[in-house]
Amino acid sequence: MTLIFTNSNMKNALQSWKSPSDPSIGRFSIGTDSLIHPQVIIWDGDKKYWRSGPWNGNLFLGLVYADPSNNYADASIQNLSPEEAHFVYTGIKTLEFSHYVFDYNGKINENYWDKFGKGWKTVYRAPDVECDVYGTCGVFGSCNPKKSPICRCLKGFSPLNSEEWSNGNWSRGCVRNNPLLCGDEAGKDGFLMLSTVKLPDFAIWLKGVNPSDCRKQCLENCSCLGYTYDNGAGCLYWNTDLIDIQELKMSGVSLYLRLSHFDLVGNRTKIKGIIAAAIISNAAFIALFIFFLRKYLKCRKDKANKKMLEKQRMRENRSGPVELELKELPYYEFQDLLVATNNFHEKNKLGHGGFGQVYKGKMEDGQEIAVKRLSTAHGQGSEEFVNEVVVISGLQHMNLVRLLGFCTQGEEKILVYEYMANRSLDAFLFDPTKQEVLNWDKRFNIIEGICRGLVYLHRDSRVRIIHRDLKASNILLDKDLNAKISDFGMARIFGRYQDQEETRRIVGTFGYMAPEYTLEGNFSEKSDVYSFGVLMLEIVTGKRNNAFWCEDQSLTLLGYVWNFWVDGNVGPVLDPVISHPIFRTEIEKCIQIGLLCVQEFVRDRPTMSTVVTMLGSDNADLPIPKKPGFTQRLTASDSDSIQMLQSSSSMNQMSFTGVIAR
């Protein structure tokens, strides 16, 4: 494969399809932003979505597999000139029929033919993790997918907005703690080496400069914020805010970050002060000893509790071993949580559900938290507690609620989450006094947020997660009304190539569960798609599906919306808050997508990735939905049908959780 970059087509050397079945021009394209030190860039419209890092004549200085000894380094740039550059894919001799595929979701995949498995396999994908997405951590932020949270400010910098940063919104980045010096005092500043990183964007090339001169020229230039020297690329420096830095396990180069002498000297002074205090003061020595002893004992307790969780998960989940290792999840002391919640006082209660109650808490450092205290009666919620800790501890996404830690003491089982100022979606959506806050723009943003969270769970996280209890009360809203999926007590981990699973224990909420799950115990990612479709129709109509009643006919909300959609007049079903004609086209599109998601048969429903694409497409491009499942409500006259269903069912246990605000 060869891509030719010229001054006229730098952004669109290769275009993506609009959808898996529509080869017209999509939103993503592959190109570059320079022909001097070119880097391959995936564009989302006019915005950068992913970049390879600059080309140094031998490899790209930002690819995970860019190490020359690695068999996956199979790309090169030839015939460089001021007007034209050729990106050439030469293939890997050790792989059969190796080739690149640029899909409609903006991902470039390197596939090869597995002659043993008799199928195509992907050996490389970009972007692959959240850190690969351009500018995830904002300016002067560094991203590491192996850490939690994935973003941190570079040394000498602090978050621009601490509250947003702690809530997982890193897009606004970091700011410098101490200003750089200039002029005669510039020599007091220095450099901090950041090793094996993906270089930030917008590098400037200094031609014919050796390593020592590269450093010197950066120090003498008041606008220079950092530099690097690579044998292939030469001297590169930056005079704009550093963005899109990623910490790599291998490959990458060393970046020399320019810092104020206060940041550099202050750190050394602090270390000397600690050592001096430890030598001079016996009291300080004893305090340090006690501190480290407590930390050691707490670490041992954390490990013991995590082992207990893993063993309990193995015992209670007979479907197989734990497939997701626990991250370094903090352990909270029960006494600290008692203080934070004022002994779980009723005034701090946020809500309750089938497995416990949720309280607002405030830690000593001022951090607000949500504390989910599971019921101790009859061991209720034990399996859900273990399941939620194991599943969510390894997940990081802006549209998933963040699990901060857990506590187990005696019969107490407690989960600690980030606090959501606006609680849950149902508290707004179904409250006549609060509905008006959710105008159409906010509702559409919530829909998109839920979509992104589900795509991450189904496709983009390290393991595939099926939520199984998606509903309005499990969608939490932050202070800006951004959606975050919560409550993973019912979730299941799927293998990467597993399509569905069968269970004899049906759990979930009536009205949101897909037909194949309710009646046969089969669930898959398409079960979550069905629940999402129900939720989308609730967002548009402002009515609960499992509390909806049509006086003239025994219809569910799905059947009610379906009848009006078939008649070509959806106006009567819309929430009056959003019924303005200016929004009608986009709302009708969402209704059609919602009906596509709740179709009766699994094969007819789209994936969440396809739903994301549909939300960005025109109504004319959407398929025509078939009649949903569960359009009719059972009444007293249907008792024979109920008895027949119960007698023919092979499931030995069925339980439902109620829809309760929290």
Image: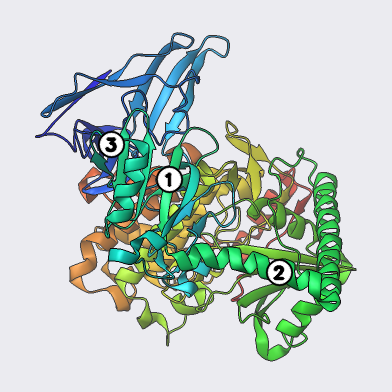
Amino acid at the residue labelled 3 = Val
Amino acid at the residue labelled 2 = Ile
The local crowd at label 3, few if under 14, some if 14 to 19, many if 20 or more residues have their Cα within 10 Å, is some
Viewer-closest of 50 and 592: 50
The reply to whether the C-beta atoms of the residues labelled 3 and 2 are less than 8 Å apart is no
In the image, taking residue 92 as reference, residue 11 lies left or right, namely left
Measuring 57% from the left and 14% from the top, which residue is drawn there? 117
Quadrant assignment for the C terminus? bottom right
Measuring 70% from the left and 58% from the top, which residue is drawn there? 329
Nearer to us: label 3 or label 1: 3
Could you say whether the residue bearing mark 1 is in a helix, strand or loop?
A: strand
Viewer can see residue 198: yes
In the image, taking residue 274 as reference, residue 213 lies left or right, namely left
Q: Where residue 361 appears, x then y in whole percent?
A: 66, 81
Q: Which mark is residue 382?
A: none
Q: In the picture shown, does residue 99 fall above or below 213?
A: above
Q: In the picture shown, does residue 251 fall above or below 170?
A: above
Q: Where residue 486 appears, x then y in whole percent?
A: 58, 63
Q: Marks 3 and 1, how far apart in space?
A: 16 Å
**Mark 3 or 2, nearer chain start:** 3
Q: In the picture shown, does residue 226 fall above or below 79?
A: below
Q: Residue 255 carries which label?
A: 1
**Mark 3 or 1, nearer chain start:** 3
Could you say whether the residue bearing mark 3 is in a helix, strand or loop?
A: loop
Could you say whether the residue bearing mark 2 is in a helix, strand or loop?
A: helix
Q: Marks 3 and 2, how far apart in space?
A: 41 Å
In the image, taking residue 50 as reference, residue 457 lies left or right, namely right
**Mark 1 or 2, nearer chain start:** 1
